[in-house]
Image (tube, rainbow, N blue to C red):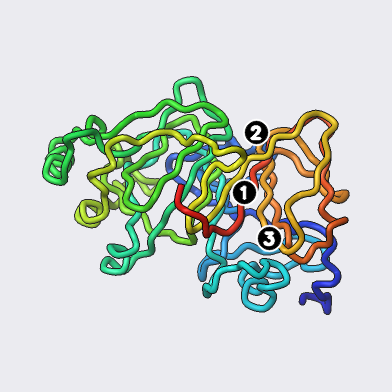
Amino acid sequence: MQNGMTLDSVTGPLRLRPLYMERVWGGRELETLYRRKLPEGSGPIGESWEVVDREDEQSVVGDGPLACATLHDLWQKHRREIFGETAPDAPRFPLLVKILDARDRLSIQVHPPAGVAEKLHGEPKTEMWYIAKADADAALYIGVKPGVDREAFAAAIQNGTVEDAVHRIPVKSGDFIFVPSGRLHAIGAGLVIFEIQQNSDTTYRVFDWNRMGLDGKPRKLHVEESLQCIDFTDTTPALGMADGSVLVSCPHFIVERVQLGPGSSMKWGRVGEFSILTVVEGAVTFEGLPLRSGDFVLVPASLDAWQRGLRTDDGAVLVKTGFGGRAGS
């Protein structure tokens, strides 16, 4: 490992450095909500990539004995020790975790299902959204309305009535929704969202509200690709319903919500199990490491039982993300 350190030196969770992405629909909400230090002189920040292993973007361990190690190095060289026996056989870490700050609406878009993605030379992308903060009138745009088939939707694109063909679902903090590949969707304005997804960056925009990009020009649309990907049978979308602590369980990831009352303590997960811990509300201490809302850490599978102690003084809401494998949500 870096600086001659070994995995025996790892005695706690791993913090990764976030990567901030400018987006025309973003803002600076992460500065006030999570006290993040955003890049000075940047445009609107729409995404903070918290956990990523892609050829062009890499998470890096921020401190501790593994400081400066990339997520890709850990995945390739120490998969069993850090990610556990159930880690998928994949060339890169299979998940991508983000915070989205939507001050304006995102484009109406779709991600390709696996079969179509291969034909279009893209990557499939199933995701879930956890609503961390929502303005009073915030909403999501999800799925097509009954009776909207491919021909009707193509006509709506031509005559500028796409919004009328899509469900608008009001949301509040604590809501969540599953967005499988093929589901037409857009995030509305006034939302901060934790997004857990397959490791993919393929998005096909079908409508962008007649908006200009950061360069002052219309952003590229992908109408033909979108029409090949949209699931036109997806006419009754709904917000997620928790099954006990489990929010979403699909072949790609399992996401659970953990709620702790004031003065609570617990052992996080099980020995031999890897997870991503996200603090949604409140603050916790994990083996001496203070974590507050908006923080993400990797919990290595190799941590001993005594190294998994977590406590909170005033209460907290946490999200736990692990590898998938159960029946779809």
Mark 1, secondary structure of its residue = loop
Residue 80: image quadrant is bottom right
Residue 237: image quadrant is top left
User: Is any part of residue 45 visible from this angle?
Assistant: no
Residue 262: image quadrant is top right
For marks 3 and 1, give the one nearer the viewer.
3
Q: Amino acid at mark 2?
A: Leu
**CA distance separating discs 3 and 1:** 31 Å
**Nearer to us in this view, 308 or 57:** 308
Tell me which numbered mark, 3 or 1, is placed earlier along the sequence.
1
Count neighbours of disc 3 (C-alpha within 10 A) and say few if under 14, some if 14 to 19, many if 20 or more: many
**Nearer to us in this view, 13 or 217:** 13
**CA distance separating discs 1 and 2:** 16 Å
Residue 135 in the image: state x and y as whole percent. Answer: 51, 24
Residue 41 in the image: state x and y as whole percent. Answer: 58, 46
Query: Which residue is outermost to the top?
Result: 136
**Nearer to us in this view, 49 or 256:** 256
- What's the residue at 77%, 77% (across, down)? 1
Tell me which numbered mark, 2 or 3, is placed earlier along the sequence.
2
293 left or right of 246 in image:
right
Residue 99 in the image: state x and y as whole percent. Answer: 56, 45
Which disc is residue 33 wearing? 2
Which disc is residue 274 wearing? 3
- What's the residue at 82%, 66% (across, down)? 10
For marks 2 and 3, give the one nearer the viewer.
3
48 left or right of 282 in image:
left
Q: Amino acid at mark 1?
A: Pro
46 left or right of 308 in image:
left
For marks 1 and 2, give the one nearer the viewer.
2
